[in-house]
Image (spheres, rainbow, N blue to C red):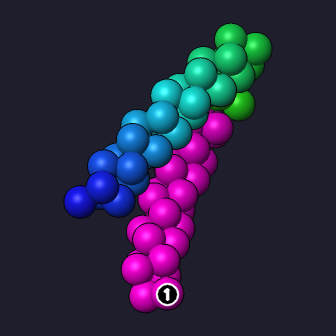
């Protein structure tokens, strides 16, 4: 249960970090900001998958 809350916390914090980065890039260049936003969601999903796999491995060991 604790691992689940840790994963949710990381997911939320990563979302805030992503929003800050996207906002900064959009302030400089609107087109590049949109590209970063589209790619950022894929990064967020990837980070979530890695976090889940890491949790599973730590439970096994």
> Quick one: quadrant of the N terminus?
bottom left
Residue found at the far right of this picture: 28
Asked if one can make out residue 53 in the rendered structure from this viewpoint, the answer is no
- In the rendered view, does 29 fall on the left or right side of 42? right
The picture places residue 57, in percent across and down from the top left corner, at: 49, 82
Hey, which quadrant is residue 59 in on the image?
A: bottom left
Which of the two residues, 16 or 35, is positioned nearer the viewer here?
Answer: 16
Residue found at the far bottom of this picture: 60
- In the rendered view, does 14 fall on the left or right side of 21? left
Q: Residue at x 49, y 87 (%)?
A: 61
Circle 1 residues within 10 Å: few <14, some 14–19, many ≥20: few
Q: How many marks?
A: 1
Magenta stretch: residue 22 in it?
A: no
Residue found at the far top of this picture: 27
Q: Residue at x 39, y 53 (%)?
A: 7
The picture places residue 29, in percent across and down from the top left corner, at: 73, 19
Which of the two residues, 27 or 52, is positioned nearer the viewer here?
Answer: 52
Pointer 1: what residue? 61
Residue range highlighted in magenta? 34-61
The picture places residue 30, in percent across and down from the top left corner, at: 65, 20
- In the rendered view, does 41 fall on the left or right side of 22? left
The picture places residue 14, in percent across and down from the top left corner, at: 52, 39
Magenta stretch: residue 42 in it?
A: yes
* Magenta segment main secondary structure: helix
Q: Residue at x 57, y 33 (%)?
A: 18
Q: Secondary structure at mark 1?
A: loop
Asked if one can make out residue 24 in the rendered structure from this viewpoint, the answer is yes
Q: Is residue 41 above or below residue 25?
A: below
């Amino acid at each position: 249960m604790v691992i689940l809350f840790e994963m949710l916390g990381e997911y939320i914090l990563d979302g805030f970090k992503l929003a800050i980065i996207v906002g900064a890039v959009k302030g400089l260049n609107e087109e590049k900001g949109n590209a970063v936003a589209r790619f950022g969601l894929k990064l967020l999903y990837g980070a979530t998958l890695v976090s889940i796999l890491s949790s599973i491995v730590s439970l096994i060991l």
